[in-house]
Amino acid sequence: MRYKHLFLVAAALAVAACGGKKKASLPTDVGPTGVVGVKAVKPKAGEAALTRATAELRARREAVLSPEVSGRIARTLVDVGDRVQKGQVLLELSSSTAALQAEQAKAAKAMAEAGFKAAETEHKRTLELAKGDAAPQALVDRVTTALEQARAGLQQATVAVEMAQDYHGKHFIRAPFDGVVTARYKSAGEFVTSMPATPVYGLVDVGSVELRVAVPETVVDVLKPGAELDGTLSPSGKAFKARVRVVGTVVEPGSRSVDVRADVSGKLPSEARPGAIAELTLGGKGAVAGLFVPSDAIHGEGAETFVFAVEGDKLRRRKVQVERLNPGQVRILSGIGADELVVVEGAAGLSDGATVRVSG
């Protein structure tokens, strides 16, 4: 009986220990019934001035280079980070057969040139003889025809040489513009094809950096080509000037924004690399009215944007149309009203119909 009593006590302690561990592993915002705490706010009605916009720095000239013919890579002559000049050879494919074909075409052209010179000389001699009635007309016609055939043969041989040299030249990948090698996808010894095209190098002209920014259609008219804007690189905080080059004429259906492109004025900061982010100050001239929510409330899957609204104690996914204004702020165009609660924190990993508790 004593051992049985001790066993029951040990079992009870084990159960209590397991229960304690399970309780400790629960998230602090999840109750015992699986209710998740979320933070929600109502859309704020009013006006907002578009004062800033987030822009991306992109190279105006960038390319992924592929071979024009299939073959095995003999040599790679540059690597990632190398600066190259237009026309510089970056990669060579095995080209011994193409080189021999080019030499063969040159030899055929030399034979055609010799034949043409011989036919030309014979034609001149026959014409001189014909002037003194020493050559019949039939002979003149025959040497004239032979000369034309020799001329056509030389032209054909000349084209064959150009084609062979062009084919041989396609075994070399050259830089289409001055730039920096940003990627090398293949190495010596690997086989590459022209169809489908095998990417070999990535090349970017870092000297042709431009700013691309999506500006809401309702305020884009405050920007005109030639307008100067203040910019700040992120995260360095380096200031620079930019001048608007192009204001797009097409509205992007999903975001209702217009593509605006600007060039950096003056010396480009060293941190202004393609792919960097910058904040542009647009002057705050354009103000729009509507419902506004923090950008953290907006979620997206492909071209669709949605929010999580709280109805009672349930989470409801609601499709919305939005217009992104200043960093951190979004204007609601359709999908929710001013009296609805929109989740701004805590909805990560949850889905439509989840039970929630609004904590703030």
Image (cartoon, rainbow, N blue to C red):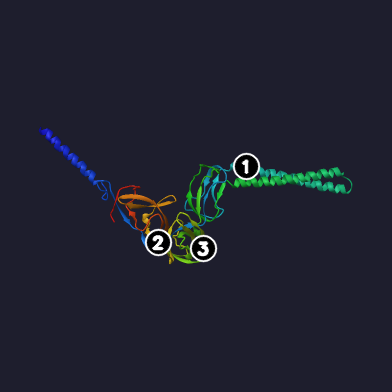
The residue located at (83%, 44%) in the rendering is: 141
> Quadrant of residue 93 in the image?
top right
Residue 176 located left or right of residue 161:
left
Q: Is residue 328 visible?
A: no
The residue located at (19%, 39%) in the rendering is: 15
Q: Where is the C terminus found, in terms of image quarters?
A: bottom left
Q: Earlier in the sequence, mark 2 or mark 1?
A: 1
Separation (CA) of disc 2 from disc 1: 73 Å
Amino acid of disc 1: Leu
Q: Where is the N terminus found, in terms of image quarters?
A: top left
Q: Are marks 2 and 1 in contact (CB under 8 Å)?
A: no
Expressed as whole percent of the image width and height from the top left, the position of residue 261 reads: 49, 60
Q: Earlier in the sequence, mark 3 or mark 1?
A: 1
Residue at the disc numbered 1:
100
Identify the disc placed on residue 245: 3
Amino acid of disc 2: Gly
Q: Of tags 2 and 1, which is closer to the observer?
A: 2
Separation (CA) of disc 3 from disc 1: 51 Å
From the viewer's side, name the closer residue of 280 and 291.
Answer: 291
Expressed as whole percent of the image width and height from the top left, the position of residue 156 reads: 70, 45
Amino acid of disc 3: Arg
